[in-house]
Amino acid sequence: MTPTLRDVAELAGVSFKTVSNVIHDHPHVSEATRSRVLAAIDQLGYRPNLTARTLRSGRTGAIGLAVPELSLAYFAELADEVITVADRHEMVVLIEQTGGDPDREREALTGPRRQLTDGLLFSPLGLGNDDADALDVDFPLVLLGERIFGGPVDHVTMENVAGAAAATRHLLDLGRRRIAVLGAHTGEVIGSAGLRLEGYRKALADAGVPFDDALIVDAGPWHRSNGAEAMRNLLARGTSFDAIFALNDELALGALRVLGESGIRVPADVAIIGFDDVDEGRYSFPSLSTVDPGRREIARLAVETLLGVIAAGDARSPRRELRSAFRILQRESTTL
């Protein structure tokens, strides 16, 4: 049977109240008594009851993380970073996958699972700026990503426009002028695709290089399979190009495969750079140049901001928009 506080008290030869005081680190317990209680806890394998702790303190000791898709390496690696940061603060992370579906994203904000956590890190994909009112909730919430700006809660995001412009400049600095973009979403302005395309166009304009719509290739979800398909579509057009800016690393990895199959040398014939710095890009052949958006900093800012909101309780402060720093990582796919 699961050991209880009374089992610990009996083994240690102390009262139930003394065991409770040791667990809650009350100062008025002798070191000898504390040592006996801790030894009894270890011997029995006692673990505090989460439900009981919640009833006493009003806190669960857990935070939620709702992301679109863990099969995308960026979100899987972000979740790993969030768990690492939360662990340093002795918090548990409960992860929910929404599939980028607007109804499931709303459910993450209003459903019964919300009661299991003290607050939520929320990265929407289906909801957009017109849904900002959905974020006006009565529990601690921190927004991640690029789908909603100007909402009522703290927002941790990345430098999409500046990072994309830097990636494009990197290719321009190599002497490339026919830079194709893989992964555009027609008509998108707010969102990762729209913002990164904006950065691309800005870098071209600053360099005096004309924008050519024939070099922009749409794609659906940013998976490797869609990157491969977008690459095949570009090759089928017969449009000349000497570089590729893939709007995320998954697309770039798919494109790399098709370029290799087509006998196109990277980077001698075509240089390629991605965005997100997922781990797999270090081990592709050639290794993938990319924009590191500061995922570790995003995780730290997100968790620490959420914990600050939890600690503040009802004492709300003005919303903040926090951005991580980025850097260009040059690897073999852009190094001759």
Image: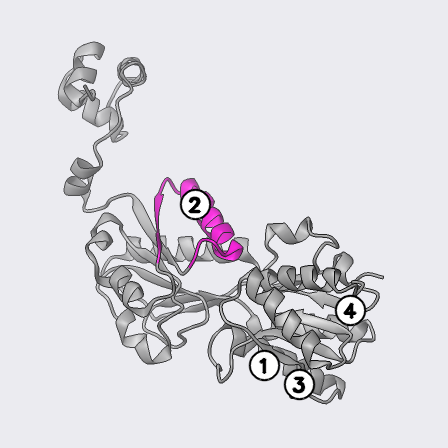
At 20% across and 20% down in the image, what residue appears? 3
Read off the magenta span: 69-97
* Residue 268 figure quarter: bottom right
* Residue 334 in the image, given as x and y percentages of width and height: 77, 63
Q: Give me the residue at 32% from left, 58% from top.
A: 309
Quick one: 332 or 204, which is closer to the camera? Answer: 332
Foreground tag (1 vs 4): 4
Q: Considering only vertical position in the picture, is 233 above or below 98?
A: below
Asked if residue 197 is positioned above or below residue 13 in the image, the reply reads below
| Sequence-earlier tag: 3 or 4 | 3
Q: Write down the residue under mark 1.
A: 198
Residue 94 x %, y %: 33, 47
Circle 2: element type: helix
- Residue indicated by mark 2: 83
Q: Is residue 234 magenta?
A: no
Residue at mark 1 to residue at mark 3: CA–CA distance: 16 Å
Q: CA distance from mark 1 to mark 4?
A: 22 Å
Q: Nearer the viewer, mark 1 or mark 3?
A: 3
How many residues crowd around disc 1 within 10 Å: few (fewer than 14), some, or many (20 or more)?
some
Residue for badge 3: 214
Q: Could you tell me the amino acid type at mark 1?
A: Glu
* Residue 29 percent location from the top left of the image: 25, 21
Toward the viewer: 323 or 29? 323
Q: Earlier in the sequence, mark 2 or mark 4?
A: 2
Which quadrant of the figure has residue 8? top left
| Mark closest to the chain's N terminus, 1 or 3 | 1
Residue labelled with disc 4: 270
Q: Amino acid at mark 2?
A: Ile
Q: Amino acid at mark 3?
A: Ala
Q: Are marks 1 and 3 in contact (CB under 8 Å)?
A: no
